[in-house]
Amino acid sequence: MSNISFFHLASVYPKATEIMVENARKHHPNDYYFLGVDNTFSYQTIADKYKTDYKFYHNKVGGPKGDYGYRLDGTLEFLSRFHDACMTPDSDHMVMMEDDVLIRKQITIEEDWELAGQKVTVGNIIPKNIVDSIIDFSGKQPNNVQYGFGGGSIFKVSTFLDNYDRVL
């Protein structure tokens, strides 16, 4: 089995954030946990209580807006934050935490897993204009036009880092 780390960007729900961090710590007490805050108010007390790395970001990534979802600058900033968190720990995989990802038992993963996300067969449709942008950029039609890598998804750190500069 592989070791694991956690990446969590919080915003406006400190009680939910604390419950998620607390539950992660119950099952992964010594694994690396990065807690960042998206330009709202300090979560330093939570970070200290649960022994996480902590960063307060002064620029807000925010949520999806308009027909295209997240703004490009917000998406690039989010990926930059994820990249920075991946550079810090000595672990194989990173869990993308959110304020609604409740860990109920220890997470075990196989070392060769590249990604682990939700299987999506209904909903979460990627808008056609985004699919068209993907095709324009890559020259390839996606096999699936739904997304399923939200909160709780697990990414192999080396795969993300190896491809980060290439795709940005």
Image (tube, rainbow, N blue to C red):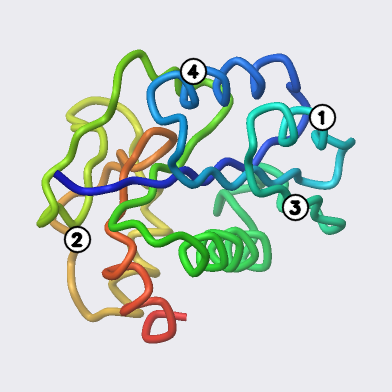
Q: CA distance from mark 3 to mark 2?
A: 35 Å
Q: CA distance from mark 4 to mark 1?
A: 16 Å
Q: Which mark is residue 45?
A: 1
**Of callouts 4 and 1, the N-terminal one:** 4
Residue drawn at x 66%, y 42% is 63
Q: Position of residue 55 (x, y in %)?
A: 75, 52
Q: Position of residue 158 (x, y in %)?
A: 29, 70
**Of callouts 3 and 2, the N-terminal one:** 3
Q: Which residue type does callout 2 highlight?
A: Pro
Q: CA distance from mark 1 to mark 3?
A: 12 Å
As drawn, 166 above or below 123: below
Which one is closest to the eye, mark 1 or mark 3?
A: 1
102 or 64: nearer the eye?
Answer: 102
Determine the residue located farthest toward the bottom in the rendered image.
166
Residue drawn at x 58%, y 68% is 80
SS state under label 1: helix
Q: CA distance from mark 2 to mark 4?
A: 36 Å
